[in-house]
Image: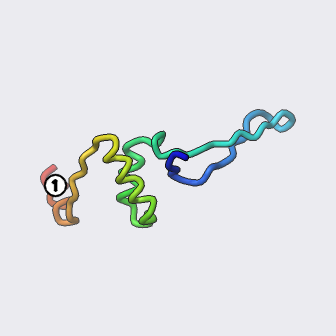
Amino acid sequence: MPTKFKKDGVEYKGSRATRVAVKKKYFISAVSKQELIDYINSSNAKPKIRQKCLNELTRRGVRLNWLTPEEVEARKAVN
């Protein structure tokens, strides 16, 4: 089974009378690069899912530059 980013969900299509439930699957390979990076940087990221995101970015060939908070502030001051 492919790696999941989050639990499966249900979306409803159609109006009230003809509503149909469609299962929505959240595979990590379908998530955008920016969404994975945002999840890694979020303060409430779960460690297991954070590692899945790092593994997926590595698989895609993305190299990450890790910065300390001081370096981030210094870059903001320059711009």
Q: Nearer the viewer, residue 1 or 4?
A: 1
Q: Count residues near mark 1 (Cα–Cα under 10 Å), then give few for <14, some for 14-19, many for 20+.
A: few
Q: Name the residue that disc number 1 marks.
A: 75
Q: Residue furthest front?
A: 1
The residue lying at 45 percent from left, 41 percent from top is 29
The location of residue 42, given as percent across then percent down, is 39, 61
> Is 68 on the left or on the right of 50, as rendered?
left
Q: Is 40 left, or right, of 1 in this rendering?
A: left
User: Toward which corner of the image does residue 33 lie, by quadrant?
Assistant: top left
Q: Where residue 28 sits: x, y (%)?
A: 47, 46
Q: Residue at x 12, y 52 (%)?
A: 78
Q: Is residue 4 left or right of residue 12?
A: left
Q: Residue at x 28, y 43 (%)?
A: 62
Classify 30 as above or below 4: above
Residue 38 in the image: x percent, y percent? Answer: 38, 53
The residue sitting at the left extreme is 78
Picture quadrant of residue 74: bottom left
Q: Going 45% across and 59% down the picture, which residue do you hit?
A: 49
Q: Give the amino acid type for the residue marked by disc 1 in the picture.
A: Arg
Q: Position of residue 45 (x, y in %)?
A: 43, 63
